[in-house]
Image: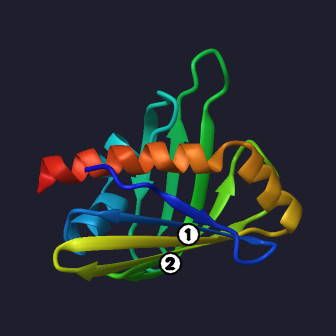
Amino acid sequence: MTNATELATPSDREVVLTRVFNAPRHLVFDAMTTPKLLERWLIANGRPMTVCEVDARAGGAYRFVWQVAGKRDVGMHGVHREVERPSRIVRTEAWEDWDAGETISTSVLTEDRGMTTLTTTVLFPSKEVRDQVLKSGMAKGAGESYDHLERVLTDVA
């Protein structure tokens, strides 16, 4: 069963993505912090992840790079501010090819009867940056990535 990814904009600088997965939250948490699993689902438009480095602890850094056919690779990096297994991840995010400033991403995982709700709030440095990201197709890309995550969770369950 595929669930829709919900997107909300509760303030001028925030985007909230919500998705329910048919998996216990420890599996969803693992899929969000384990490189071998991240590489399988954190993709968009057929852009494979070629670098996936994750130190999933408070103060630990991460870096992702996606290969884009015929273009420069796209990279993102940041630092985990909080990691509370299996319920919460707070991290900074910065795109390596776009000087838009740093965002703060807070993911909260709640479980009810084996179903996990993942709520990710992204706080952007400005309304302009948030609006630009929304116009770039964030809703579609997040939905596709979460569809991939749902399939990975089915495989590892």
In this image, 122 relative to 134: left or right?
A: left
Q: Quadrant of the C terminus?
A: bottom left
Q: Secondary structure at mark 1?
A: strand
| Residue at image location 81% in from the left, 57% down from the top | 131
N-terminal of the pair, mark 1 or mark 2, is: 2
Q: Is residue 125 above or below residue 144?
A: below
Residue position for label 1: 79
In this image, 123 relative to 29: left or right?
A: right
Residue 45 x, y percent position in the rendering:
52, 30
| Residue at image location 61% in from the left, 31% down from the top | 73
Tell me the quarter of the picture where residue 12 sits. bottom right
Residue type at the position of mark 2: Gly
**Residue contact between numbered discs 1 and 2, judged by CB atoms under 8 Å:** yes
Q: Is residue 88 above or below residue 155?
A: below
Tell me the quarter of the picture where residue 116 sits. bottom left
Task: Give the label on residue 59, or none.
Answer: 2
- Could you say which is closer to the camera, residue 150 or residue 63? 150
Q: Residue furthest top?
A: 70
Q: Residues within 10 Å of mark 2 (few under 14, many from 20)?
A: some
Residue 23 x, y percent position in the rendering:
20, 65
- Could you say which is closer to the camera, residue 88 or residue 139? 139
Q: Secondary structure at mark 2?
A: loop
